[in-house]
Amino acid sequence: MQNASKPLPSDPQALQNIVLDLQDQLAEKEAQVDQLSQQYQQLLEQFRIAQQKQFGQSSETSANQLGLFNEAEQTIAEDDTEAEHETLTYTRNKPKRKPLPDDLSRDIVIHDIPESEKTCDDCGHDLHPMGEDKSEQLEFIPASIKVIEHIRPKYSCRHCEQQGTEVAIKIAPPPPIPIPKSFATASLLAQIITSKYQYALPLYRQESLFKQYGIELSRKTMADWMIRSSELLTGIYQHLKTVQLQQSVIYADETPLKVIHEDKSRCYMWVYCTGTDSPSEHPDQPPNIVLYDYQASRSGQCAKDYLQGYEGYLQVDGYQAYEQTEATLVGCFAHARRKFIEAQRLQAKGKTGKADWAVNHIRKLYRIESEIKDMSPQDRQAIRQQKAQPLLQQFKAWLDKSALQVPPKSAVGKAVAYSLGQWHKLERYLEDGHLGIDNNRAERAIKPFVIGRKNWLFSNTATGAQASAILYSLIETAKANGLIPFDYIKHLLDELPKQPDNIDHLLPWQVNLIQNDKSQ
């Protein structure tokens, strides 16, 4: 910069050059200040994001996960909060206890007064019955274990024995069992499988539980049973996969898994879903199928191999690996919204900004989905074209404008860039009423595996991980079809040894185990 104490030249051209030079230097300084300011904002955002991840509560965290160790206290606190809000509008009704199921067995216990007291204290006449006061209590009976002893009488020909000829011995064939030469019944295997894969109870804990009943059942034996059971169930798993790949829409996601005896430090469990989380009687609803697929990597070849030849819709997040498949990719508005929510959290308290506008606008799209969730796919598509399409056009215009106004490396800038980069996939859900607005179907399906992983931590071998994939698949598919997983797994293990090649009638939407179980 020019020295202020130095005399200025009298030549106008020289003065103009000095002014231009000063303007250039000032512009350079301003650019440096802007760059430093952006760096400061980026560092501040990174700090707040790290702070939120470590100490903050995720808005999408499941209440079941939050309440694992604080269920009673959390429930009471929620009830108090609800009561506080409700007193502002109306008097809260006293909660009523739900009646116990009628199909439970009942022991009737009558508590009557002695015969000597069945007279009136005033006149001495006999009292007559005028009604009764009834209450119910739920009794818990611990699990019982019994031994089923199979006896097969042998028969031979005494006449042939006396003649010294070869004696033919006749004996009934052994009953088909899930694991030959094992003492495990279908019910025992179903109990161990559901305890681990539905309720996340590791085998070493189950080992200690069996010891309480005087049964020495090592985790090594149970682990072998899990693998042998998965081999028996592979046929139905493959049949479910065949049906799944015939559907028009599949949801997919993946999560890491540690496998001890595997070359790679991080392996992955992929999940593929069709249908919804719960059974529906709507004729246009695709079958509810949840299938896990263990792979040693997260490369796109894994999804390509599983979906080989599939050309329908594949609803996923923004992970690029799915681009290698032949499917038509559909984006996830939940992921787009999540990035704006992250930017929203970085704002100063009491301040609103672009992130708030985006979150509120996406909320309008979800409000439409809430209104049409029970409609037919054709009606859903028609209403989306009418109501959602104008909102999407407005959102796209806002994204294009915001991309020119916000720093690209800021939280809002990254959120805008993600939505623009995924836009042709995000708006694709308008094309078909079978599609969802997001990929939450797959994220909910993979959550039981993530929760279970926190308990049993890792798989020992790739074989064990593959067995886990099959067993998780059948349990989650049973749940999605309204079946009790224990009953369904037991039914499969009972029936498959009898007729391993006839499995159409064993598909979860073809059986009615709930009524069968209650009738026993």
Image (cartoon, helix red, strand yellow):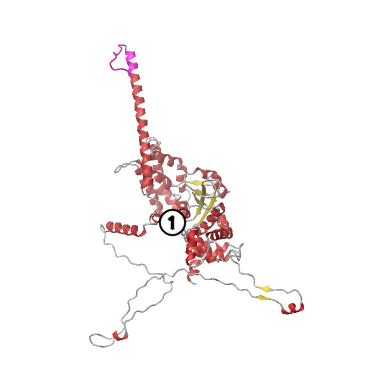
* 304 vs 169, nearest the viewer: 169
* 34 vs 275, nearest the viewer: 34
* 482 vs 385, nearest the viewer: 482
For mark 1, does the 10 Å Cα neighbourhood hold few (<14), some (14 to 19), or many (20 or more) residues?
A: few
Q: Most extreme residue toward the top, as rendered?
A: 10
Pick the quarter of the image with the N terminus. Answer: top left
Say which element carries label 1: loop
Q: Is residue 5 magenta?
A: yes
* 79 vs 167, nearest the viewer: 167
Residue 246: which quarter of the image? Answer: bottom right
Instruction: Kindly report the secondary structure that dominates the magenta region of the rendered protein.
Output: loop
Residue matched to label 1 = 375
- Where residue 288 sits in the image (x, y, percent)? 50, 57
- Residue 283 visible, this orientation: no
Q: How many marks?
A: 1
Q: Is residue 268 magenta?
A: no
Residue 376 lies, with reference to residue 410, above or below; the image says below
Give the amino acid type for the residue marked by disc 1 in the picture. Answer: Met
- Where residue 377 sits in the image (x, y, percent)? 47, 54
- Where residue 120 sits in the image (x, y, percent)? 26, 85
Instruction: Report the side of 49 relative to 230 (left or right).
Output: left
Q: Residue at x 34, y 22 (%)?
A: 23
- Residue 393 visible, this orientation: yes
Magenta-colored span: 1-18
Q: Most extreme residue toward the left, as rendered?
A: 122
Q: Residue at x 76, y 76 (%)?
A: 164
- Where residue 440 sits in the image (x, y, percent)? 44, 51
